[in-house]
Amino acid sequence: MFKKTIIGIVVSLLLTIGVSAQETDNTIEPLQPETEQKLYWMSMPVICGTQENVEDYLKTFKFNMANMSVGKAGAKNDGEIVYYVTYWISEDFTQSIAVVTNMTATESCMMYKSFGLQWTDPPKIGKDL
């Protein structure tokens, strides 16, 4: 009887600890807590690989680079450059992919691939891209 009681208490404690850990995992870290925008980091599904493999994917599916920019530390204009951002458009101008690449150009992540791209004035390859 005593042994069953001890086992029951241990199991109850383990279940309680598991539930408590799950509750604290959902906390949100603010991006810039001093600002009023209330932005936060979250887990997003992205597809990553070596820069070479990501570029091979983009070429295979006929995407062309539309523009390039840089990400800066602290999301501040005067921050140090910490990553590169490229924006790719499909040859038929209906899809887009945003890619982020680390400073050493060894790893890239496709942040999203969107469909049904609408243009107010469609660009022309060789002229606008």
Image (cartoon, rainbow, N blue to C red):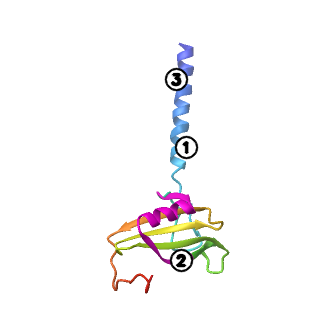
Q: Which segment is the magenta one?
A: 45-69
Front residue of 24/120: it is 120
Rendered view: 99 above or below 11:
below
What residue is pinned by disc 2?
A: 68
Q: CA distance from mark 1 to mark 3?
A: 20 Å
> The residue under label 2 is which amino acid type?
Met
What residue is pinned by disc 3?
A: 8
Give the mark nearest the N terminus, 3 or 2.
3
What residue is pinned by disc 1?
A: 21
Q: Position of residue 98 (x, y in %)?
A: 47, 69
> The residue under label 1 is which amino acid type?
Ala
In the picture provided, is 29 more to the left or to the right than 57? right
Could you say which disc has been placed on residue 38 in the image?
A: none
Badge 3: how crowded within 10 Å, few (<14), some, or many (20+)?
A: few
Nearest to the eye among marks 2 and 1: give it.
2
Q: Residue at (35%, 83%) from the top-left corner?
A: 122
In the picture provided, is 125 more to the left or to the right than 40? left
Where disc 2 sits, the SS reads: strand
Inspect the magenta stretch and tell me whether residue 10 lies in it: no
Q: Position of residue 112 (x, y in %)?
A: 44, 64
Where disc 1 sits, the SS reads: helix
Q: Residue at (47%, 62%) from the top-left corner?
A: 57
